[in-house]
Image (cartoon, helix red, strand yellow):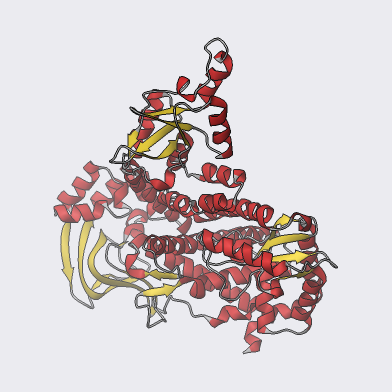
Amino acid sequence: MIALLETLKSNLPFSLLHEPSLMSIEKMSKIAYYPNGTSLLKQSAIADKLYFIIKGMVESRDDEELIDLYHTHDTFGGIELIKNQPSSYDYIVTEELICYEISNEVFLKICEENKAFKAYFFSSIVERMELFKEKKEYSSMSDLMVARVDQSLLHPICEVSPKTPIIKALQLMESSNASSLLIKNPEGYGIVTDTDFRHYILHKEEKSLKRIEQIQTYPMISVSEGELLFNILLLMTENSVKYLPVLNNKNECIGILELIDLLSFFSNQSHLITVQITKAQTLQQVITASSRIEVMVDALYAKGVKSRYIARLVSEMNKKMYLKLFELIIPKDWHNRCTLILLGSEGRSEQILRTDQDNALIFEEGFMPNNVQVIAQQFIETLDKIGFPRCEGNIMLINPKWCKEIDAYKQDIDNWLDKPSMEGFMDMAIFVDSISVAGVKHLHTELIAYLIERVQAHKEVLTYFVKPIENFESPLGLFSQFVSHDKAHKNEIDIKKSALFALVHGVRSLALEHGITATNTTLRIKALNNEDFMDKEDATDLMEALEVINTLRSESQLKQWKRGEKIDNYISLNSLGNLEKDLLKESLKSVNKFKKLLVYHFHLSIMR
């Protein structure tokens, strides 16, 4: 029974209970076995116990219609007990069942004592997502407490000899863009920071301060490589220091840890990365700073932050990165005559990990530099170094199709609508999700306005534009079971093809129809709600479905990234807990409902 109690404690809603409630369950409940075909609870009968499945499967049916399936660690019967009402369904064992039976009296008493436990049985997908987030946030605290210092957090050393003149040392510090100086004395290291330089400015005459050794802090406080970050935070706080040298096992300094880095790690690191990108003076500095974004994403997911907020944060940081690359790579005389745009998931602010590059350049009419391909090549190669895989569809500014004058783009828009084709619709879908991040942004604004104006005059084209949502089957079968359609990926589902594409493309199509200029899918759904196209409940369900799908997809991709594997869109069903599976099922049902709405609204059935 102890093992079973531990199982209960690790699963919602029992994880919400305190020890006395769990002990009362253990004392007053029993383990039961039922063979296949057993009727546990008949329709219209009064329930007298709560069931928690240890092993097996139970179906709930309304006459011949299958309503739901219950698997290992699922609970059922709770709502009937709380409402003291007859069962609405027949509960039948379809795979021999071993279960934990919790008596009516114990269950109702616990419900009265624990409101959160009781509320769980009536919770929506939104509320269960919040419980899932809180569970992750709690479990992540231990990870933060055991994190150790590594090279990714350290700044390069700016080192001088003790006899170096102060002015010369200061010049070296400035040219190295360093915030501290390391002094290598014969007997060990010293350090000079902005505090020491203030002392120099105030007292250089009276104390005849000329050499850097005269103003160094010695002996300095340092830590060893691999020390716990939490211990370092305590050390820096206790000693009021902002810069801390890190030594290896040979007592050699391998880098400087700054307090702001440490605080960023224990928050989300976004401030640190943003500052480093903004202050970067070389491409290598941009590459180094941008390479830490995945580490930040991992930390945010561990804390349970919603995926749409992480995506927005990453998007803002990527915009700053692209702006800096534009400033460093694109010739100055181009800056007021072109604009850099991001397309696809980057344009929607929904790309969290670097799945591919989607970018383009729009030039003002009559301006097309001769060396554009050389510059474009350097731009894309820099993104390669940062870690952005090249777009398999070649939607990058090294492709002349996505690097041309504004009138040439307008000709493309005319062709998409006047000469419809699947390739044209694909390009239109990519372009309508675009945003401008650098240069003369009105060039992009003009093109989007032109596209929306043309679509309003040719709305019949949207029926063909939206039709690809029917190309991929749902991974949810007739009996609410997951179905894997790819034999090469057993017990895995391609969440992008089977759910995310239909949701995103459907919303995109409706946004075009209604002249909505927002590119982010969540913002488009909110705008459709404001347009009274969909009510608040449907909009909320769709946004939460998007949240669940993106969260599970991103977590799977993070695991692939950590293992050094190629990032794809497959989710392993075996890696999901019961709550995650329930949330995914509800999300897929919401997507299927939305697809039916699109089929009706755009009259897709008449095209069959």
With respect to residue 335, does 225 lie above or below?
above
With respect to residue 501, does 243 lie above or below?
above
In this picture, residue 49 sits left or right of residue 268: left
Where does residue 433 sit, x and y in percent of width and height?
66, 65
Quadrant of the drawing holding the C terminus: bottom right
Q: Which one is in front, 433 or 183?
A: 183
Q: Which one is in front, 224 or 99?
A: 224
Where does residue 279 sit, x and y in percent of width and height?
60, 43
Quadrant of the drawing holding the N terminus: bottom left
What residue is rendered at 44% in x and 76% in y? 475
In this picture, residue 473 sits left or right of residue 59: right
With respect to residue 74, does 165 lie above or below?
above
Where does residue 137 sit, x and y in percent of width and height?
39, 47
- One can see residue 156 in this view: yes
Q: Which one is in front, 604 or 356?
A: 356
Residue at the front extreme, as displayed: 163
In this picture, residue 310 sits left or right of residue 131: right
Residue at the top extreme, as displayed: 206
- One can see residue 104 in this view: no
Residue at the bottom extreme, as displayed: 608
* Quadrant position of residue 586: bottom left
Residue at the right extreme, as displayed: 366
What residue is rendered at 22% in x and 42% in y? 20
- How many dots with numbers? 0
With respect to residue 47, does 28 lie above or below?
above
Where does residue 476 sit, x and y in percent of width and height?
43, 75
